[in-house]
Image (spheres, grey):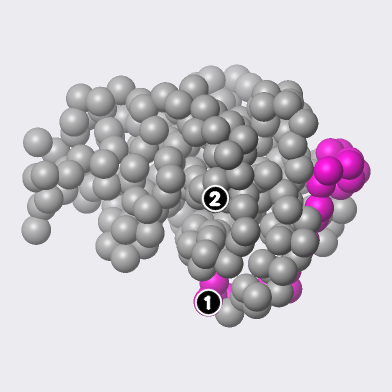
Amino acid sequence: MKNRNQSIQENYNLSFSKERTINTIDNAVKQSKKSKIYVVNAHIFCEGIIDPTYQELIKQGTINTCDGINVKRLVKWTSGIDIDLFPGPDMFQEIIQDNRLGPLKHFFLGGSLAVSKGLKEVLGEKDKEYYSPPFVRKAEEFDYEHIASLINTQQPDIIWVGLGAPKQEKVIHYLFDKLDKGVLVGVGAAFNFFSGINSFKRAPEIYRKLHLEWLFRLFQEPKRIASRQLRNLKYLIIGYIKYRK
């Protein structure tokens, strides 16, 4: 049944502005307050349409950002709300490489061993810890006690989770209560983009300005991205029908 009381922005707890997101992270770090941030792209939005339990998990984020023009457009078309785009890789760059919030301690959870090694070479090791967990098919199969112990020992300000949706959002959810402090942020492919590995390069700026980053990734991983784009198109349409006024 169509939910007429909740908009997309409300059901996915989307931040209206980039600055509000940055300020939320800054305040949480300064107060040593645990927080979780989900970066909602079309794939995550569609997973929420398919699985209401997953959508409810996303809604519980302290504050979430909009990553992707299709989600931004759907919010605008269905409720008239114009929200900022703030993709995970952009947040990653601003906070880590551009030092937007000053010196912080970071923990990187996810990525292959090769990606973790690349990140370490690009970003360095000062105030940074990297952990590439053994592959599991389901988020429930991770050893959360072990992961939480690693993180709590380091006491990082921000825990970046790069395990791909919908797994990484579930990992953040399961891990949250086991941590002493820290802002958990799911950033998907950002680890790959900033690893320095040529085959994982992020789309050039012209693609991003034209909102065609998906097309660049299609060239990199044609089978996987094509399948995902077709699936997402179906559920974006379903989402529009569900949430339109």
Q: Nearer the viewer, residue 30 or 190?
A: 30
Q: Which mark is residue 48?
A: none
Name the spot of residue 78 as percent of width and height, x first.
Answer: 19, 33
Residue at 33% over, 46% down:
12
Query: Judging from the image, what secondary structure is the residue with disc 1 in?
Result: helix
User: Where does residue 27 sit, x and y in percent of width and height?
Assistant: 55, 33
What residue type is disc 1 on?
Glu
The image quarter containing residue 206 is top right
Q: Which label number is shown at residue 140? A: 1
At mark 2, the secondary structure is loop
Measured Cα–Cα span from mark 2 to mark 1? 21 Å
In the image, is residue 36 above or below residue 102? below
Q: Residue at x 89, y 45 (%)?
A: 125
Tell me, yes or no, whether the highlighted magenta stretch contains residue 189.
Answer: no
Q: Position of residue 109 (x, y in %)?
A: 70, 57
> Quick check: marks 2 and 1 in contact, CB under 8 Å?
no
* Front residue of this view, candidates 35 and 43: 35
Callout in the foreground (2, 1): 2
Write down the residue under mark 2: 34
